[in-house]
Amino acid sequence: MRLPSPSSPNPSAILLMHCPDNKGIIATVSEFIAKNNGNITFLDQHVDASKSVFFMRIEWELNGFAIPEEKIGEYFDVLIGRRYSMQWQLHFSQEMPRMAIFVSKLPHCLFDLLSRWKSREIEVEIPVIISNHKDMEPVARQFGVAFEHFAITGANKQEQEKAQLELLARHEVDFIVLARYMQVLTEEFVSHYPNRIINIHHSFLPAFPGAKPYHSAYERGVKVIGATSHYVTAELDGGPIIAQDTIRVTHEDSIEDLVRKGRDLEKVILARAVWHHIQRQVLVYQNRTLVFS
Amino acid sequence: MRLPSPSSPNPSAILLMHCPDNKGIIATVSEFIAKNNGNITFLDQHVDASKSVFFMRIEWELNGFAIPEEKIGEYFDVLIGRRYSMQWQLHFSQEMPRMAIFVSKLPHCLFDLLSRWKSREIEVEIPVIISNHKDMEPVARQFGVAFEHFAITGANKQEQEKAQLELLARHEVDFIVLARYMQVLTEEFVSHYPNRIINIHHSFLPAFPGAKPYHSAYERGVKVIGATSHYVTAELDGGPIIAQDTIRVTHEDSIEDLVRKGRDLEKVILARAVWHHIQRQVLVYQNRTLVFS
Amino acid sequence: MRLPSPSSPNPSAILLMHCPDNKGIIATVSEFIAKNNGNITFLDQHVDASKSVFFMRIEWELNGFAIPEEKIGEYFDVLIGRRYSMQWQLHFSQEMPRMAIFVSKLPHCLFDLLSRWKSREIEVEIPVIISNHKDMEPVARQFGVAFEHFAITGANKQEQEKAQLELLARHEVDFIVLARYMQVLTEEFVSHYPNRIINIHHSFLPAFPGAKPYHSAYERGVKVIGATSHYVTAELDGGPIIAQDTIRVTHEDSIEDLVRKGRDLEKVILARAVWHHIQRQVLVYQNRTLVFS
Amino acid sequence: MRLPSPSSPNPSAILLMHCPDNKGIIATVSEFIAKNNGNITFLDQHVDASKSVFFMRIEWELNGFAIPEEKIGEYFDVLIGRRYSMQWQLHFSQEMPRMAIFVSKLPHCLFDLLSRWKSREIEVEIPVIISNHKDMEPVARQFGVAFEHFAITGANKQEQEKAQLELLARHEVDFIVLARYMQVLTEEFVSHYPNRIINIHHSFLPAFPGAKPYHSAYERGVKVIGATSHYVTAELDGGPIIAQDTIRVTHEDSIEDLVRKGRDLEKVILARAVWHHIQRQVLVYQNRTLVFS
């Protein structure tokens, strides 16, 4: 059962779509909404001229819309989607997404996500926090969220991931946030949540993928460090980037300073990616994201 | 006579509009273009919910468009504009705008604009550079642009401005860039180029308007300094902001360091504002800009 | 009684000083430390050439230092300080500062400070959280910190501040952080904690002081918003700035978006100022800070 | 013959040094200067604790300094340098460095450097501009700088580099700036100007080294792009980084937009690196820079 999101007094529908570029798509889609008495509150489109692909995010108020919610998808597909060979997703603002958090030992992203949740900055349900260590259990308890510990070894990884997947299914989890989770997920695991696992990596990817990026950044002598939030794919730190930013550092910064300064960036960038995701602003196409915000 | 802008192989039309918010505007406008065989290459809209005003920038390719260029405005107004009580402007990408530069003694913004013009980063005609000092005449000459000197005193200001206006009219100037021009223009002068005079102010407005903002920034001990490019209005440094950015400074920066670091910001922000302006991305409403980019 | 700060395995002494500029100060001070067998781990100096004032922060390891801790101040003053007419402060890294938090209804800065404290990102004692509202009491309780409510009215303000001062004294509070505390402190209150009350203001000061800066920023149409952390003085939002930063916004951002984006800046900038303060990196001179970091 | 740099009314000496960390170095060096009547105007030091190496930049006024300029190096080495096993460099502010520019076809960095030179933002002599194409000859001529064309082919590269080296020697060039020079220099060539060839690479290294970084950035879907200025070493785009910065981009930015936005970053970052270099603020140690500014 989904709780309605309380901060959406005007429920709205959101369509994310892409298709081969063509004349008249915007007119057709916006007319479909307008003729059925929907008031468009957001429309942003993008044409990738080099690939001739059209992308759009459109949002409209449902109050007074002539087509009932449960029929909108069908009508849209029959009347428009098929005609333009569209790939589309339909979302409703009043659906409250269910988010699981995976964490290891570092608290800053976990504290930040839970604080935002508690303050209603991000409107989600958090049914469970999963960890390969017990260190963060007190934090989960402090915020009143269930905590499940799965010790991971080379030998038991597959089995443990299977148990995690069952747990996630039982909790009807929509998407997963890896809040500095220090385990590589298997391709099998990832395939259950395509473009629905959000990771934070502590470098400006594609520089310094994998382990210990702050150490590598220090050794290379960079003058900026960064953080990157991306959807997890089979390729390590290679998935579509949702949000990314950098800050300047100097020769005076030790590795410990980079870690300290990076923490603030990591938690802000991860939260930004989660925000875009739950606002249904993100469309993935060929390992790149379009973020309509 | 206007030169065609050579970098636009596909000529396009651009409509900037705003009107009371209403259902169906996007559908109506985009259908108007699509039905007449125009391919929309850009559409971005914005609704100011608090004021119930709808804003849009739409651009489409003219090749094959059914309505002749010189009739588009009329057709649009009759069929759509009046119906929605729209304020709108129509531009064509192949029109090369004619830009005058006003400068005093500081060379960095002038060098930067002329370099971008020479490199075709900005596609404009520069018929004349106007200055209240002679210092920059060699720079103008070096780039092969006419230079006109108007010494300004308290006594001759009105008269000199009148002569400047005649010169600008003779050169068919479309818009003016104040590249660190150290004279306040009179309200009378400004009224001839509404939202067509672009200034760069060396602070993050509204902080430190008027003279010597770097000195004030130093005295106040700020940790960031900024630059602001805005359209000139009757209120000093009070016009609609087009582009603005800041950089961090420390206690180690003397006023001279602020001036030096600020220069780079000033020239980049001014050039960014000029770019938005000539791309017809800027819409002014109630002393604020919408920059559709 | 002060707890030793556990993260300083090598205890060190920190001197912050300023005096009229003169030849030989660095040599004299560094020789004083070296001759007494102290290893300097940090030295940064600054000369304000326009005012002929010399500033320095110097830190050295105490292990093996010939002068006992409790005598360092006396020796330094007699041998050096008086000779150069210095103003100086001496701190020891192993002292754990005692920080009180004042908060009203907004949770983001409070959550952030408490999370950093719990994670030992900032090494302080937090004996008490003080508020003019009861909304944040559950957050204080969640983190196990005492919460004291002082309802403030026009009539009882002086009396309540007196009670707050007694409470702070009883808790041996060293400095106060206003984590979005929506009350102006009286000059009398401020005078008890000179350069020891840290506020976060949600604008890039000196722009938009006082109430509702995001509303003012929206109305003015700025393209960046900011946050400023400063020591509180008698002048509202006029004290010495410790940390300040900005982020870019666009016409698409409503006031609510500014508030949302600003929150991340506020909490990061406030935490940065607190970090500088407890690392004894901040020296105040004529309403400006030097931050040696 | 070297021209005196006219903007240094108070000539000063600058020492850059590093050595094994030890007690008393700062005291010894600053006492050496103070006792000989030198007024220190800048001192910044850094200890790399992990490697136990001490670094320092110290600058003092020469007026009234007891040791004649031509003897300072000898005295310093005998009295201090050898004792601490120092590596050190001595510079004098009134020496005007001689800078050669290498360029290919892109004008923005060239225009920017020449404009700064003409405006005296950077105080250097520019005896010659060298290019593997003729496109930039008019720009060189416009600024009155000699232009030398060296067509480079696989077959003639060694021979042409030899001729370039002779030309540079004849012009007594101190350092070289590669202002978007699209040729890889041979190891042999680079060995003649160790830490004296400054390159600008159009990405945030170590991401996207080599050719076409904006295309790679687009394909990877990054949300920031960057520019990196570094000293050239035998390893392509692998030398010590002097300055680096990034700007945010979105899915709306085509490759052409990345190129356009990146240009502003490139020219500012390259100029910043040149500034640090000619101010003698840069010390290279193990392929990393310390920039004392």
Image (cartoon, coloured by chain):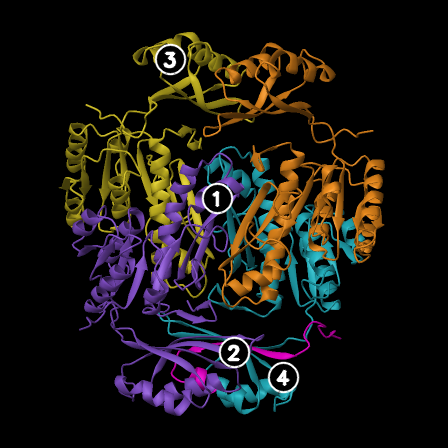
Chain colours: A purple, B cyan, C yellow, D orange
Residue A41 appears left or right of A163: right
Residue C79 lies in the magenta stretch: no
Foreground pick, B285 / C39 = C39
Give the amino acid at mark 2: Val
Q: Which mark is residue C65?
A: 3
Give the amino acid at mark 1: Ser
Q: Earlier in the sequence, mark 1 or mark 2?
A: 2
Residue A99 appears left or right of A43: left
Give the amino acid at mark 3: Phe
Q: Mark 4 highlights which residue?
A: B62
Mark pair 1, 2: CA separation: 38 Å
Badge 4 marks a residue whose secondary structure is loop
Chain for disc number 3: C
| Mark 3 neighbour class, 10 Å CA radius: few under 14, some 14 to 19, many 20 or more | some
Badge 3 marks a residue whose secondary structure is loop
Q: Which mark is residue A216?
A: 1
| Mark 2 neighbour class, 10 Å CA radius: few under 14, some 14 to 19, many 20 or more | some
Badge 2 marks a residue whose secondary structure is strand
